[in-house]
Every structure is written in structure tokens, then in C-alpha cells.
Image (cartoon, rainbow, N blue to C red):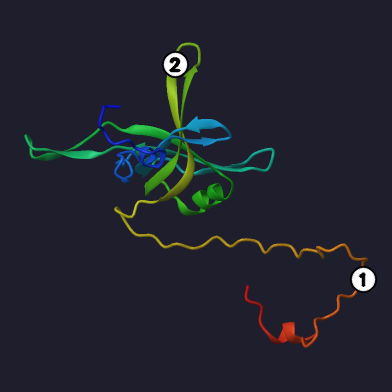
């Protein structure tokens, strides 16, 4: 610290500038962790290039996969034309309820946005080697910059009726509070 410089307390030092202002946002998200492991989150727009393949694993896990083709166009001022960039290919994998919704909602040729965890795997089959780039989807939706869609909420199964939470003998009757008629619950609708 320079002589004569004001001393910052710990609270302002945590904020970054010493003037009570938070540090500037960079637009880059810090890697998230799941189970102590770090992973990269990406968002990719593109076209569903294959039919969605839906399977159920031996453990009963719903899985849906499709190939995503992603390329971008740019305007070439020299030629006055739009130029397509090289296509990037991804395998998109979704699980559980998302897998069911992806299978029910997406068709080959539709424009989509995929957000998820990036996995890059090296492979070799003797003569050839390559990379498989996979996105483990956290969210998938239609690209609304390219068209419209209609949303339908997925119905959730009703929770099973829970038994009494108290330690009472089976068949023991709970007395109604004074001034509260026994049939009042049926007269008043439940809020949920």
C-alpha cells in the first residue's frame, strides 16, 4: 500500500473497486459444478438434423438423442452475398422428463436452442480417430427468432395421499377444535 493512500476495509475490498461498486460483469459465466466436478455450459442454436431417437434404459431412465447442425451466416460485403459458415455437429442427449418433452415436441428440420453441458470425447476404431461433441441438455426449445410455437405444460402426477404424520394408534380419532364444525372442510374449498 502506498503511503498516504486511503485504507480499504475488507468489505469494500470484496466489492472490487473500493468505492462500494461491484466488479464489472464480463458476460462470461463461471463454470458450474455438479457433485464437485466442474463443467462448461454452452448455448447452441441450430437445426434438428435427425429424427429424435427415444429409448428407455435398463434402469428405466428415459433418454432422447438427436443430432444438431449449427452454422451461421455472415454478409460478405465484397461479393454482396450471404455466406454460410462451416457446420458444427453436436449430439444432444436429454434425460428424464426433458427427454419425454423433447421426443414429443421436436421434429427433424426444426430450429432449436439447446443449453447444456459440453462433453468432448476422443474415439478410435482402429484405422480412424475422431471427436464426438455431445451436449447433455439442461434445456431445449424452439428458436423463436425463426418461428412460433405453442407451449403446453406437462401434467404432473398427483401426489399420493400421505398418512398421518403423528404417532397415533390406528383408528384414533382427532378431536375437532372448538368452534370448528366437523363438516366445515367440505363446505370450504381447499386452496390447492
Residue in front for this viewpoint, 146 or 53: 146
The residue that mark 2 highlights is 129
Query: Where residue 65 sits: x, y (%)?
Result: 50, 40
Mark 1 closeness class: few <14, some 14–19, many ≥20 residues within 10 Å:
few
Identify the element where label 2 is drawn. Answer: strand
The quarter of the displayed image where residue 86 is located:
top left
Q: Residue at x 35, y 42 (%)?
A: 46
Residue 163 lies left or right of residue 21; in this view the side is: right
| Residue pictured at 34% horizontal, 32% vertical | 88
Q: Is residue 23 above or below residue 177?
A: above
Quarter of the picture holding the N terminus: top left
* Quadrant of the rendered image containing residue 25: top left
Q: Quadrant of residue 43?
A: top left
Q: Is residue 139 left or right of residue 85?
A: right
Residue at figure coordinates x 80%, y 63% from the top left: 165
Q: Quadrant of the C terminus?
A: bottom right
Which circle marks residue 104 in the picture? none
Q: Nearer the viewer, residue 176 or 57?
A: 176
Q: Residue at the far left: name it.
A: 78
Task: Report the front residue among 184 and 89.
Answer: 184
Which class describes the residues within 10 Å of circle 2: few (<14), some (14-19), or many (20+)? few
Q: Is residue 155 above or below residue 63?
A: below
The kind of secondary structure element at disc 1 is loop
Q: Position of residue 89 (x, y in %)?
A: 38, 33
The first of marks 2 and 1 along the sequence is: 2
Question: Residue 171, which numbered label?
Answer: 1
Amino acid at each position: 500500500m502506498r503511503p498516504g493512500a486511503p485504507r480499504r476495509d475488507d468489505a469494500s475490498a470484496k466489492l472490487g473497486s473500493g468505492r462500494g461498486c461491484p466488479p464489472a460483469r464480463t458476460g462470461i459465466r463461471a463454470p458450474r459444478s455438479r457433485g464437485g466436478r466442474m463443467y462448461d455450459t454452452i448455448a447452441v442454436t441450430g437445426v434438428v438434423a435427425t429424427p429424435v431417437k427415444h429409448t428407455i434404459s435398463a434402469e428405466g431412465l428415459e433418454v432422447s438423442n438427436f443430432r444438431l447442425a449449427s452454422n451461421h451466416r455472415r454478409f460478405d460485403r465484397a461479393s454482396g452475398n450471404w455466406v454460410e459458415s462451416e457446420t458444427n455437429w453436436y449430439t444432444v442427449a436429454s434425460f428424464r422428463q426433458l427427454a419425454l418433452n423433447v421426443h414429443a415436441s421436436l421434429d427433424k428440420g426444426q430450429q432449436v436452442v439447446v443449453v447444456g453441458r459440453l462433453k468432448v470425447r476422443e474415439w478410435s476404431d482402429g484405422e480412424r480417430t475422431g471427436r464426438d461433441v455431445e451436449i447433455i441438455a439442461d434445456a431445449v426449445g424452439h428458436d423463436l427468432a425463426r418461428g412460433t410455437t405453442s407451449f403446453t405444460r406437462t401434467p404432473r402426477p398427483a401426489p399420493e395421499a400421505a398418512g398421518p404424520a403423528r404417532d397415533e394408534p390406528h383408528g384414533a380419532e382427532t378431536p375437532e377444535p372448538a368452534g370448528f364444525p366437523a363438516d366445515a372442510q367440505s363446505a370450504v374449498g381447499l386452496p390447492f
